[in-house]
Amino acid sequence: MTPAARLQSAIEILDAVIAAAAAQGAPADRILADWARGNRYAGSKDRRAIRDLVYAAIRTCGPIPASGRAAMLLLAQRDPQLAALFDGSAHAPAPIGSNEVAAQPGIAPAWLEERLAASGISGDEAAALLARAPLDIRVNRLQADPAALVLPVEAESLPVPGALRLPAGTMVEQWPAFAQGLIEVQDAGSQLACLAAGPQAGETVIDLCAGAGGKTLALAAAMGNQGTLIACDTDRRRLGQLAPRAERAGAQIAHTLLLDPGREAEALADWQGKADLVLVDAPCSGTGTWRRNPESRWRLTPRELERLTALQARLLDIAAALVKPGGRLVYVTCSLLDEEGAGQAAAFLGRNSAFEATRPDVPLGMPRGPGLRLTPHHDGTDGFFIACLARA
Ligand SMILES: C[S@@+](CC[C@H](N)C(=O)[O-])C[C@H]1O[C@@H](n2cnc3c(N)ncnc32)[C@H](O)[C@@H]1O
């Protein structure tokens, strides 16, 4: 493909990404994969160049752009070589008209930039939300000794025990160490959240929002496969992915419990007041993970944020009832908005006098309200809020 034809393809793919964001359709990664399947003439270099253009445009536009072409015109304003490809030749985009309007640059739609700024995320902190994320792995202590593990490429050691950083795009899933369950792909921030939760061998631990079990597996490893570990979620498909992952990782204590939305407490009736630790890795806006899904900031609406904060508060209350006296509730979100983090934890403490916040002894993060916050700029991890809430 010529550079201009790649540009035209990127514009068309962006149109699909924009439409999908507005209609809560497929994510950009899937749209790119579908495009590659339907356009076999595009070789690997073409696909990489198109992907880079699409993601550069997504990262540069703040509000959702009017069209793929408007998004690409914004990039062209900053790159004369790209602008020169709008020449109207075969398979190339039409020449740029004198009245054409480029998309607006920025970090996010205006309402969301305001909420982030109100939560202390602006300037370099905000810009770092859209940088390219590295690839972090966790050495699975159930099956590997971090000191003895040999990997095909050199990895950077991180301050979180067992966490290693690799160049973005490393194909770890193709490594024998991955197939053998010696390593897991997991952002260092996620690993730190599990470290902060401090699971101990022999404890009864409930992972209330386990999803596909990323943190469940880290908890099982930290517990040395000793104790009781219940992984819950309302999403059957995600929870269904845990068993094969646990098998590969040798995590024998992880059991799943599918919850009915709105009737979670019923399914958990036997565990009321019994858990040493309840982890609430709550559904959230994901503002801390925009490095990985930059177009997700075009999907969030004030209404959806309201729905999420109400759900987080409800899940915190469900979790509180499961914690035994002397136990702890650890609340985690991959959001940097205070209404989902520090504000949510403070409101919980306001309505639950039996709980008090404790400071986790972890090597990263900054205090934020009753908890701790990790940011891509300050900590080099995805953005997280973590609160450790101890029951008297
Ligand atoms: C942030 S994700 C969890 C990620 C997971 N802990 C991990 O480490 O990979 C939040 C999860 O909450 C689940 N969820 C949503 N509503 C829920 C509810 N009412 N009860 C329990 N889980 C819920 C979602 O299905 C989603 O899997």
Image (tube, rainbow, N blue to C red):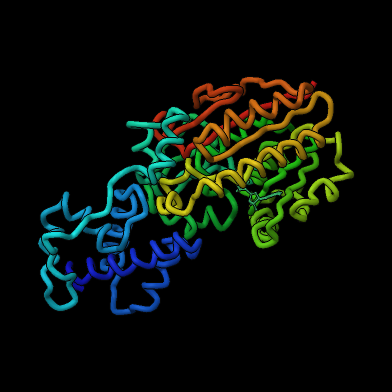
Q: Which residue is the extreme one toward the front?
A: 99
Question: Is residue 157 among the parts visible in the rendering?
Answer: no
In the rendered image, the quadrant that contains the N terminus is: bottom left
**Residue at 17% across, 55% down:** 76
User: Whole-percent x and y of residue 22?
Assistant: 45, 60
Quarter of the rendering containing residue 356:
top right
In depth, the one of 206 and 87 nearer the eye is 87
**Residue at 28% across, 72% down:** 43
In depth, the one of 258 and 265 nearer the eye is 265
User: Whole-percent x and y of residue 100?
Assistant: 18, 60
Q: Which residue is the extreme one toward the right?
A: 270
Quarter of the rendering containing residue 371:
top right
Asked whether, in this view, residue 344 is left or right of residue 380, the answer is right
User: Whole-percent x and y of residue 46?
Assistant: 26, 68
Question: Is residue 379 among the parts visible in the rendering?
Answer: yes
For the image, the number of numbered tags is 0
In the rendered image, the quadrant that contains the C terminus is: top right
Asked whether, in this view, residue 211 is left or right of residue 107, the answer is right
User: Whole-percent x and y of residue 88?
Assistant: 12, 73
Asked whether, in this view, residue 322 is left or right of residue 330, the answer is right
In depth, the one of 82 and 182 nearer the eye is 82
Asked whether, in this view, residue 96 is left or right of residue 276, the answer is left
**Residue at 37% across, 54% down:** 64
Residue 36, placed above or below residue 320: below
**Residue at 44% across, 41% down:** 112
